[in-house]
């Protein structure tokens, strides 16, 4: 089973537009928070990956909004691996509030050398964790 992590969050006032709805770009901020927790839970933290001289950069993000989040809402985001290739990985982020689906986000990342920013293969020890082997 591919790796997954669920993390709880609460909407803060500064994340909302003037009518109290979460501004759309904040959903990507939420995915970044949850991705950090994903790396911590499954790989000991993002610094472990950086210690290999590697980084991941966002290549593509797709968002499907179902319902709005509002100020002070508590919600959960489940991050799961949906694909791993030689040099990239895709995480799916499912947003729910009290069991109700809020949004679905799919983000593809490319593994790169942290200094040259050139595409690199995902190391086998990382790949095996991501794929749940």
Image: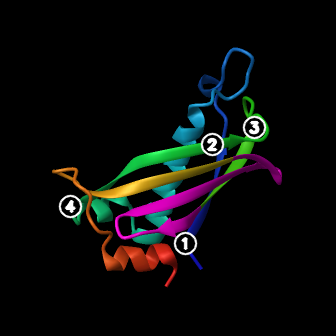
Q: Residues within 10 Å of mark 4 (few under 14, many from 20)?
A: few
Name the residue furthest top.
18
Q: Are marks 1 and 2 in contact (CB under 8 Å)?
A: no
Disc number at residue 53? 4
> Which residue carries the number 2 mark?
63
Q: Residues within 10 Å of mark 2 (few under 14, many from 20)?
A: some
> Which residue carries the number 1 mark?
3
> Which residue carries the number 3 mark?
73
In the image shown, does 46 or 113 lie closer to the viewer? 113
Label whose residue precedes the other's in the sequence (1 or 2)? 1
Expressed as whole percent of the image width and height from the top left, the position of residue 93 reads: 61, 54
SS under mark 2: strand
Label whose residue precedes the other's in the sequence (3 or 4)? 4
The answer to which image quadrant residue 7 occupies is bottom right
- Find the distance from the CA under tag 3 to the CA under tag 2: 19 Å
Expressed as whole percent of the image width and height from the top left, the position of residue 103 reads: 71, 45
The answer to which image quadrant residue 85 occupies is bottom left
In the rendered view, tell whether residue 48 sits above or below residue 73. Answer: below
Label whose residue precedes the other's in the sequence (4 or 2)? 4
- Find the distance from the CA under tag 1 to the CA under tag 2: 21 Å
């Amino acid at each position: 089973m591919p790796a997954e992590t669920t993390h709880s969050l609460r909407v803060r006032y500064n994340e909302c537009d003037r009518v109290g709805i979460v501004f759309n770009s904040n959903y990507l901020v939420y995915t970044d928070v949850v991705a950090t927790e994903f790396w911590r839970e499954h790989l000991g933290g993002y610094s472990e990956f950086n210690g290999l001289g590697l980084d991941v950069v966002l290549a593509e993000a797709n968002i499907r909004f179902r319902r709005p989040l509002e100020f002070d809402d508590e919600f959960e985001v489940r991050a799961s691996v949906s694909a791993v290739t030689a040099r990239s990985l895709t995480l799916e982020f499912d947003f729910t509030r009290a069991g109700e689906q809020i949004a679905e986000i799919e983000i593809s990342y490319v593994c790169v050398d942290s200094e040259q920013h050139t595409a690199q293969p995902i190391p086998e020890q990382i790949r095996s964790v991501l794929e749940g082997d």
